[in-house]
Image (cartoon, grey):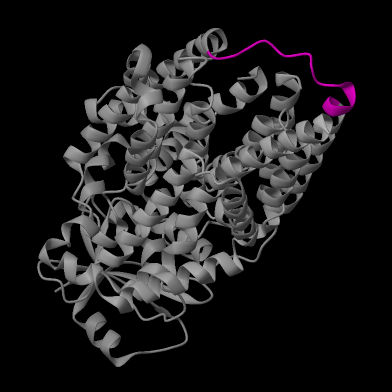
Amino acid sequence: MKSWVVLILLTLSAAVSTYLYTVKSEAPTDADRISKALKGISGYLSIGSHLVFRCSVPASDLFPAYVSYYLTPVKLVPPGSSGNDTTLMMSPVTATDSTETAIIAQSVIIWQNKDDKYRYLLMHHR
Amino acid sequence: MQRNLLNILWLPLLPGFASMVYYISLVAGLPFIVPVLLVIAFGYFSYVWLGRHVAVEEATSLTKAHIAWSYAILVAGVVIMTNKSYYIAPQYGYWDSWTIWNYHAKFLQHPEYRKYLFSVNPEMHADYPLYLSASIAFLRRLTGCDNFVVPYALGYCIQLLVPVSIFLALHRKSLPIAALVFFLIVTDDFYLERGLGQYADVPLALLFLCAFICIEDAQKKPGAVLMAAAFIGCCMWVKNEGIMLAVIFIAFNIKTLFAAGRWKYFLAGIALPLLTLLIFKAEAPSNDLLAAKGTKAMDLLSDPDRHQIVWDYLAYNFNHYYIPLKIGLVIYAILCIAEKRWPARNLLALLCCMLGYCIVYLLTPKSIDWHVHTSMDRLLMQLMPSFMYLMALRFSRLRFSLGDEVSKI
């Protein structure tokens, strides 16, 4: 078997498969939604800073991972961590939570955004 | 080693080398052009060197029908894989893609982010080596594509190379056996899903397989020792368990790797991966499993409930995801008993690797049930291609020996 024939075959296969992957139409995922929503936040965060992430969306365990990924290299810490005065809150647009309302009332909102499902608030504690 | 097989084995060395020099260049604060030029130079010189020192002339012993069938099988398998992969592939990979491999790549894409990699949350496994992450980061910077197309394309190429390598390594010995193994892998949805899930298990499986393929030629061509050493070095650079696989591989092939002056080739092959790993480990936090062991090891090892859990999951995996492998191992064992022979040395090495995994599970400081449940299927994937190759190698010889017996009669 000729080497170049095998290499061309594999290259073609990789190119076609990658093309099919890129044009594959799938409904937007939560990762897409978060990526789009957080686009404007990076200007408010310094490199390597710590950010309390408060998420009241029970849908996916991967939400903190999506947020960490798109905000790299910001480190997310759980609520209650000491020494962190900036919080990113993510919650459903349709629901209101009394704890969240209280936190918002005690904070200054630096940046916010929302999409059809969630709202995102970046807050600095007073 | 035939040139076509050598070319295929040369391919996974490229991301290996790129990831290492890219990581070292980040540590040293070198501009991006340096690793790019080094990778181009490595690609050219390694191709030429391997062609001179490892490749053998194309034998003309194959019939035209054999060659035609080989092409037909290869094309059919590649078409099947091309057609199946894109819709089996999860859009952005699975859990580990988000929390480990692609996430770490984000830190490596920007030189100023690298130092923060080691301060991320412990569940993000900053101690995991960077073959995959650094390759993705390198390719993303090179292409300017900061998206999931790069990890998909890399994952696809790697998972394609596994069955193709096995096929090219075996088709001269026995076309039916090579075709059977080839189609078993390319039509295995579980394999494709894992390969395209942007995990590091299939890359590790490919590199370990390549080491076994190379070691077959080590007696004839010392250059193959260099390749085998480079592959096990890359195994160590993919995942922490790759270090265990490398140690077992070396222990079982020590004579082949070191005798008759071949140790020089071994050192040449493993030097860069080892150096890169040492630089990385000097910066990275310690492994969570190793850090948590301590004095309770004997208690954990002697707990029968833990053994039962590991055994149950092992049996479950073999009965659900690795049925061809299970059948192959049973046939192999029957053959060994019938012929009153020990299994091949490297098959014993693979069994040792499996035993090593089981011991790690027994010693895990995490919930053993959770740990086994979330990872055993992928760990077996790391060994599956090598198992299939080594068993097929044995079965292909059997076919010829039976043929000889028949011809004698």
Question: In front here: A106 or A83?
Answer: A83
Residue at figure coordinates x 42%, y 54% from the top left? B354
Tell me where residue B20 appears, x and y as whole percent: 35, 29
At x 39%, y 50%, the residue is B352
Q: Quadrant of residue B153?
A: top right
Q: Residue at x 26, y 37 (%)?
A: B112
* Residue B301 is at least partly visible in this image: yes
Give the residues drawn in magenta, as a range: B54-67
- Quadrant placement of the N terminus of chain A: top right
Out of B229 and A69, give the one closest to the viewer: B229
Instruction: Locate the C terminus of chain A and report the quarter of the image it occupies.
Output: bottom left
Q: For the view shown, which residue lies furthest in the right direction?
A: B65
* Front in this rendered view, residue B403 or A123: B403
x then y, percent, for residue A33: 51, 65
Residue B237 visible in the displayed image: no
Q: Position of residue B98 (x, y in %)?
A: 43, 57
The dominant secondary structure in magenta is loop
- B316 relative to B66, above or below: below
- Residue drawn 25% across and 64% down? B363
In the picture shown, does residue B14 fall above or below B181?
above
Q: Where's residue A72, x and y in %?
A: 33, 52
